[in-house]
Amino acid sequence: MRFEAFIFIVLFLTARIATVYGKEVPIIPKPLVSTPVDEVFVLTRATPIIIADKEAEKTGYFLQKELLKHTGIPVTIQDSGTEPAIVLSLSTDSDLADKAYRLTMDAQQIHIMSSDDEGLFLGTMSLMQIIRQTDLKDSALHLACWHIEDKPHFEWRGVMLDESRHFFGKETVKRILDWMAFYKLNRFHWHLTDQTGWRIEIKQYPKLTLVGGIGNHSNPLSTAAYYTQEDITEIVAYATERHIEIIPEIDMPGHATAANMAYPEFSGGGSERYPEFTFNPGKEAVYEYLTNILREVDALFPFQKIHLGGDEVHFGNANWKVDISVQRLMREQGLETLKEVENYFIRRMADSVFSLNNEVMAWDEVVGADLPTKGTTVLWWRHDKPEELRKGLDRGFNTILCPRIPLYFDFVQDSSHTIGRKWQKAFVPIEAVYGFPSKELMDYPNADKLVKGIQANLWTEALSADEHIEYMLFPRITALAESAWSDPKQKDYSKFTKRLANHLVLFARAGLYYFDPFDPKKFPEYLSPVQRNNIAPDFEELMRQEQKSTD
């Protein structure tokens, strides 16, 4: 009997260990180290958030607000207290690297520790993911416990939103920032000017928005839409609270049509297909005009980075061949081609950005412009031109990877979709996002040192409603986050999809209109509000059914 009892105990413990350690951590992106703990922490309104260090207060108050918003549980902030409690602490003596965090949980305490405030915030986002995937029962949350040690793989984990083609407004931007923070994305590249519309108020040049803000890609006569400087300040503060940097893009010397409608005296003309497409690189007044604009932009965005565009200038620079000012510039500076004119312009404007103590960012067309590598970051977007990536890395430029395939999120994500773009027959399913960047790219010379991260770009020629934005962003944002954050050696798409199933429920609860990769025909690409309200059963119930089938 003793032997049988021993065998029973061994089998029971073996089964228990297999159950506990076979669990998949419910967090996206997947942490570097995650070990389940066979205990439950019960979170109620009596659970205090204990701020062990004064510097942790901001994160503590943010966590307090998030708990109330998403669970309805009003907890208090204290500098000491009894267990059970949530403890936030910063420690300069910690063995944790910058931006890293440690999350430990048991029945008595949840402790988040980091050596810096950003790392502490990232740890609270992991905790919030566990919390938001736990059902409230009798005004309490029974949280499965984990031990997590985590740090980001890439420094730059970004999303770009184009609001020139279609304008979406503050609430949409804030909603994107919320989900970015939830998934530990930390760079919001804001494409605010282009051919279609100028979306940022510049007080010295009010017609940029009053005239240049008129129209969008769907309707060239729509009412002027733009962000006031007060709006910008509000959104910057919102992003800062979430440890997200905003990088404004003022596109030049091409894609300048909207600005040239407002101030035609600075136009360099265009081509038959792209009229008034460029600023005029031959007029000295243009450099003063654009530098004045950048001064106001610099004052609005405290992150010390400005994106100058620099892409696709050849689309509309035909008029430079006959423009008197440009031709004079070419003679005086010994410039033989229009590309050399373009590079001259970029160097001049980069100097203006440097004089404002900002880093220059630009698309990969600037690799040959002879910009200083120190203080310049290149965004490689032309997936069909890997030689441009190699060239930039060879020349020593810090680089962000955002190629059309697979990181343009305005590209459709299923072969049957029509709202969005394809590259020839190629599109961007979530699997492709998850598999990026390839080992081949990261094996390029200097890539390990100079590739600072990845970014998804959401262009909006084909996207005109919030539902369009949501459908293209969700759930691909989760794959982007894991590709940007997690150690490539740990990535496993099949395990990722198991975690993703629960996150679709979160999207449903938030009222997002998203694509379901497990059942591509479940929701069409776009529904009107009336059609959407007529869907039955509701999104959340559909996702619960899907979760059961996936499990």
Image (tube, grey):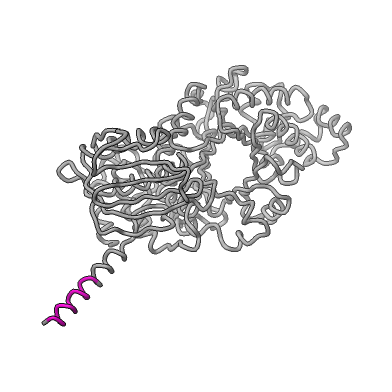
Quarter residue 207 falls in: top right
Front-most of residues 384 and 456: 456
Which stretch did the figure color magenta? 2-13
Residue at the (34%, 42%) spot, across then down: 512
Left of 282 or right of it: where is 398?
A: left
Numbered disc total: 0
What x and y, as percent, mark residue 434? Answer: 47, 57
Q: Quadrant of residue 249?
A: top right
Question: Along the horizontal axis of the image, is 40 left or right of 217?
Answer: left
Residue 9, placed above or below residue 385: below
Please state, as top left, top right, bottom left or bottom right, where the C terminus lies in the image.
bottom left
| Residue 421: x %, y % from top left | 52, 49
Residue 162 shown in magenta: no
Query: Which residue occupies 44% across, 51% down?
Result: 476
Q: Residue at x 43, y 34 (%)?
A: 55
Q: Could you tell me what secondary structure mostly forms the magenta stretch?
A: helix
Spot occupied by residue 361 in the image (x, y as percentages of width and height): 64, 39
Residue 525 in view: yes
Residue 279 figure quarter: top right
In the image, residue 59 sits, relative to residue 21, either above or below, namely: above
Quadrant including the N terminus: bottom left
Residue 167, position as x, y percentages in the image: 48, 32
Q: Nearer the viewer, residue 461 or 232?
A: 232
Please tell me which residue is depicted at 45% across the width and 44% down the height of the picture: 119
Above or below, comparing residue 403 to residue 357 in the picture: below
The answer to whether residue 468 is seen in the rendering is no
**Residue with the most extreme left position:** 1
Judged left or right of residue 110, residue 395 is: right
